[in-house]
Amino acid sequence: MENVVTQWFGDAFSHLHPLLHKLHREGGTLTGPVQVEYGPGLAGWIGRRIAGKTGAPQTTGMVGFCVEIRHTGDALVWSRTFESGAQMHSLFRPHGAFPDGYWSESTSGVELRLGVDIREGGWRWVPLRCKVHGVPLPLWLVPRTDAYKTVVGDQYRFAVTLSLPVLGKLMSYSGDLRLGEYRRPA
């Protein structure tokens, strides 16, 4: 089945792991526990402010997590839900084609321009530009993002880390997720 993801990657789509093929051909919901962490001191304080805007928990530890990945005619949509019920939606629009093209992610007034690097069958986002409420910011001013999904065994490893030079890690969440229905913890 062709969609915006398979069209954007073209022949390079075959370099992704077969489970990522399935996810990005059909869409799906990945669920499981993720480890949420914050940096120490000022870095952690900044990380918690960012987390408040994304719906991530304000405390460190394992929490239930779900990400629904689906396609529209012209975009990739991710809907993330932490066990608290807080949600974060991202709309990714493709521009050009792999390897020189990029995706624009829009989330809560922030627009990121993201390239893609394929490593060992996984998909790693490569930040290229950032706008906040339409104002371009140099990348050195915004938190550095390291975000990827890959496959380990029969699970999808999902990881996001935000950091700043000098301060280090602001926040991160990562875990091994399974394809299936989301069930909110009781």
Image (cartoon, rainbow, N blue to C red):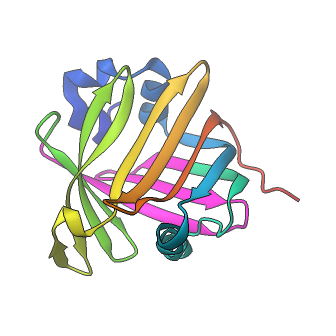
In the visual, does 31 lie left or right of 162?
A: right
Main SS, magenta region, reads strand
Q: Residue furthest right?
A: 186
Residue 160 point in image, percent of width and height: 47, 49
Magenta range: 68-96
Residue 173 visible in the shown view: yes
Q: Is-magenta flag for residue 77?
A: yes
| 61 w.r.t. 89: above or below | above
Measuring 23% from the left and 23% from the top, which residue is drawn there?
Answer: 12
Q: Is-magenta flag for residue 12?
A: no
120 or 172: nearer the viewer: 172
- Point out the image quarter for the N terminus: top left
* Quadrant of the image occupied by residue 21: top left
In the visual, does 166 lie left or right of 186?
A: left
Residue 48 point in image, percent of width and height: 55, 72
Residue 120 point in image, percent of width and height: 37, 20
Measuring 33% from the left and 66% from the top, which residue is drawn there?
Answer: 106
